[in-house]
Amino acid sequence: MSSFKNLVCHLRKVILFRFSIGFVDNIIAKYIATVVGWYAVSRPFFDRNNDSMNNMSKNELIQV
């Protein structure tokens, strides 16, 4: 009976571990990857030393 209890305990730990890894993976894939992408794309707009962006009007910046 003790070995069955150990097996059940081990399987519960494995299932909890897989759930936790899946949860963290989903968070990283959905939110952190999106934030990194937005940051990479928006860097030229926030760079005050970028002369090509500084000379554009608001309408031109929207079209870029």
Image (cartoon, rainbow, N blue to C red):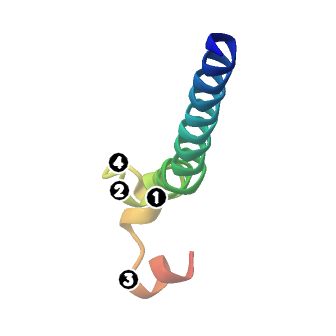
Please state which amino acid type lies under the numbered disc 2: Phe
Mark 4 → mark 2, Cα distance in angstroms = 9 Å
Sort mark 3 into few (<14), some (14-19) or many (20+) by Cα contacts within 10 Å: few
**Residue with the mark numbered 3:** 58
**Position above or below: 20 against 63:** above
Q: Nearer the viewer, mark 2 or mark 3?
A: 2
Q: Secondary structure at mark 2?
A: helix
Mark 2 near mark 1, Cβ–Cβ under 8 Å?
Answer: yes
Q: Secondary structure at mark 1?
A: helix
**In the rendered view of the protein, which quadrant contains the N terminus?**
top right
Which residue appears at 36% of the width and 51% of the height?
A: 47
**Residue with the mark numbered 1:** 42
Mark 3 → mark 1, Cα distance in angstroms = 15 Å
Mark 3 near mark 1, Cβ–Cβ under 8 Å?
Answer: no
Pinpoint residue 54: horizontal percent, then vertical percent. Answer: 36, 64
**Residue with the mark numbered 2:** 46
